[in-house]
Image (spheres, helix red, strand yellow):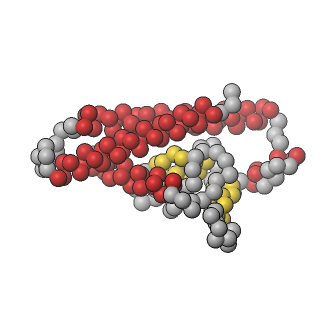
Amino acid sequence: MKTTAAAGLVGLLVVTAALAPGGVARADGFLKCVDPATGHTTYTNQAPPKGAQCTRTDGSPISVVGTGNKGARANVVKTSSPANANAGTAVASVDASTQKTRDGTRRQVLSDELASEEKLLADARTAFNNGKPLPLADEGMGSPKYIDRVKQIEQTMRLHERNVASLKQELANLKL
């Protein structure tokens, strides 16, 4: 339980970093970012968190490339996929069946990730126990250690709630 709570706190910091001003501009899509230190996963449609390893939800990797400009948005995200090299040109178009397959794959990946996040959320809610989780052997109900653990569990639960909401929104945005 302690590991999950700590991962939730780190994940909250990852989400906070992703929303910070001066982040990386994203082209499009939805990102799954994994903190290499903790293995905690965050889903976002914002700038990827610094240091996190991110992939698009369709599985294609991204890379961050600096522009050298120190303006408001000094970085841009470019896909490392050669398929996007011709984006915006006639060569970039694909036939309807290929696109339908890609859309189906993306929907399946998002659905799988949503199911995983919903399970993690349910586990966090169970551990939270309406704000009164059972104390561990080395903590009393009002001890600082217990209070800190309750806060960490709550932060983990809120993170999973945001991830579930983000994944549901992304699924709702997909074309049928």
Q: Residue at x 52, y 39 (%)?
A: 166
Residue at the location (37% across, 49% down)?
8
Q: Kindly identify the residue that appears in the image at 65 percent across and 33 percent down.
A: 174
Residue 137 visible to an observer of this rendering: no
**Which quarter of the image is occupied by the C terminus?**
top right
Q: Position of residue 92 (x, y in %)?
A: 82, 46
- Position of residue 108 relative to residue 21, above or below, is above
Residue 2 lies left or right of residue 108; in this view the side is: left
- Which quadrant of the structure image shows residue 121? top left
The reply to whether residue 77 is visible in this rendering is yes
Viewed as shown, does residue 87 lie left or right of 23? right
x and y percentages locating residue 127 in the rendered image:
27, 38
How many numbered circles are shown? 0
In this rendering, is residue 10 above or below 129?
Answer: below
State whether residue 161 is above or below residue 62: above
Q: Position of residue 12 (x, y in %)?
A: 41, 51
Q: Quadrant of the N terminus?
A: top left
Q: Is residue 76 left or right of residue 142?
A: right
Residue extending farthest to the top is 176
Residue closest to the eye, 76 or 92: 76
Q: Name the residue at 26% across, 33% down.
A: 130
Looking at the image, residue 108 sits to the left or right of residue 97; the answer is left
Seen from the viewer's position, the closer of residues 83 and 152 is: 152
Question: Percent from the top left, x then y, of residue 120?
Answer: 39, 38
